[in-house]
Image (cartoon, rainbow, N blue to C red):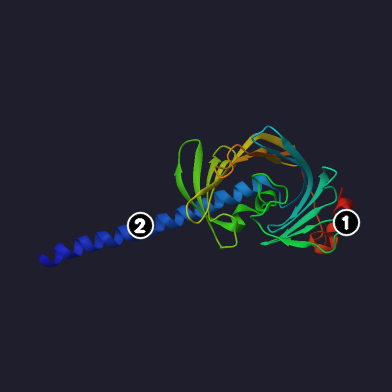
Amino acid sequence: MHRNRFVYPLALFLFSTITWGQQGATNKSQANEILKKVDENLMPASYESYRKLVNKEPNGSQKEFIFFTVKKGKDKIAMLYLSPASEKGRATLRLGDNMWLYIPNVGKPIRITSMQSVVGGVFNNADIMRLDYSVEYDATILEQNPSEYVLDLKAKTKTVAYDKLKMWVDKKNTTVTKVECYAASGTLIKTLKFKDLKNFGDGIMRPAVIETNSPLYKGYRSLMIYSGMKVRELPDEVFTLEYLSRLGELR
């Protein structure tokens, strides 16, 4: 009789532990599948795009850049500056965690980091040359309601620009609507808002505008506006340091 008093609670505890573990594994699996679908909806596996970046300052002044961008697979992206005239011909390359900046007539490309910003403003290099979220983060579902998921994203390595992201995903079309970016200390670095869902053709339906602001840069705001995106197969040769000076040939 006394033995049963201990056996039943122990069995219940073990059952609860196993059930909780299974639920946790299911949560992570479902969350990572949602994240992969978000990636697929934001960017085809291989594509080209045109976009404008606008940096707005507290005094009302602003600076605009126009980029031609190509991406292949999960970790290769190259970008050519089309304007302003002072930046035209510059190019950047990202291969996984490694990034380079090419400046015409300066010599070989120079290394840059993900947290730097070669264009100023609130967007950094990692934001502008972003890899698939599922490449850099593991996800869990924090909460959900009938219209959206809220995901917690934890960086897979310490080389990722942000230690943690909090992502809001529209359930209807599995598109991201907002992302909060956090440092390892828990400090909010910036918030990204994804707006203006647009059909670009080729089966690409994604937000055309990304707006960001940061509590660290009060009064500053940056916008990324996509004017075109289409599926395009690209050779690996394009994503090399030697090809940076020739990116314009792809247009």
Above or below — where is 144 with respect to 46?
Answer: above
Residue 17 locus on image (x, y percent) = 33, 60
Report the quarter where the N terminus lies: bottom left
Secondary structure of the residue carrying tag 1 is helix
Quadrant of res 174: top right
Marked residue nearer the N-terminal end (1 or 2): 2
Residue 226 locus on image (x, y percent) = 73, 39
Q: Residue furthest front?
A: 59
On the rendered structure, is 209 left or right of 67? left
- Assess disc 2: are there few (<14), some (14-19) or many (≥20) residues with their C-alpha within 10 Å of its C-alpha: few
Above or below — where is 248 with respect to 200?
Answer: below
As drawn, the label of residue 225 is none
Q: Which residue is mark 2?
A: 19
Image point (69%, 59%), residue name: 75
Residue 54 locus on image (x, y percent) = 72, 39
Image point (40%, 58%), residue name: 22
Secondary structure of the residue carrying tag 2 is helix
Q: Is residue 228 visible?
A: no
Kind of residue at disc 1: Arg
Q: Which residue is mark 1?
A: 246
Relative depth, front residue between 241 and 147? 241
Image point (80%, 54%), residue name: 91
Q: Is residue 154 visible?
A: yes
Kind of residue at disc 2: Thr
